Image (cartoon, grey):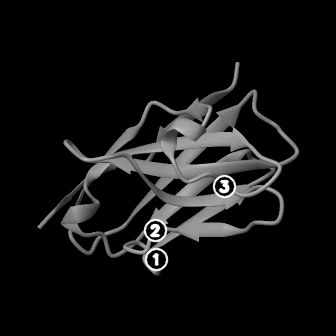
Amino acid sequence: QAQLVESGGGSVQAGGSLRLTCATSGFTPIRACMAWFRQAPGKERERVASIITEGGSTYYLDSVRGRFTISHDNSEKTVSLQMNSLKPEDTAMYYCAAHTSTGGCRRYAPEYRYWGQGTQVTVSS
């Protein structure tokens, strides 16, 4: 019954910004991990950023730290990813994912139970 729907993807020039938003429904655990993954053709799906809904602890992939910011809005039940100073290597399909948690966020995609359909981000040089 839980659904995650991404929006905000598109095409931008290098150095530009995009804000991705994941809207959730039917998913209201007391404690959960919300994450953004990305996957480029021929490459493994990698975790870009994640946040614990209780406490707000965050994780960022080294290559995006300082440029991307993940946030969670409890009242609107959304998770967003603000992406600044975009680079061509950021080009990928971006996915919203979630899992319930009694601890921290898991690292690998197979460990996430809920997924959105993905939104394409293309950064041109």
Point out residue 113 in the picture as x, y percentages from the top left corner.
Answer: 62, 32
Which residue appears at 46% of the width and 77% of the height? 65
Q: Which residue is mark 2?
A: 61
* Three-letter code for the amino acid on which mark 1 is drawn: Arg
Point out residue 69 in the picture as x, y percentages from the top left corner.
Answer: 54, 69
How many badges with numbers are in the image?
3
Left or right of 120? Residue 49 is right
Quarter of the figure with the N terminus: top right
The disc at residue 73 is none
Point out residue 35 in the picture as x, y percentages from the top left corner.
Answer: 58, 51
Which residue appears at 67% of the width and 36% of the height? 24
Measured in 3D between alpha carbons, the distance from the residue under mark 2 to the one under mark 3, in whole angstroms, is: 13 Å
Left or right of 73? Residue 106 is left
Q: Which residue is mark 1?
A: 65
Is the residue marked by circle 2 packed among few (<14), some (14-19), or many (20+) residues within 10 Å?
A: few
Which residue appears at 25% of the width and 47% of the height? 43
Q: Is residue 71 above or below residue 38?
A: below
Compare residues 82 and 32 and report the one nearer the observer. 32
Q: Is residue 121 visible?
A: no
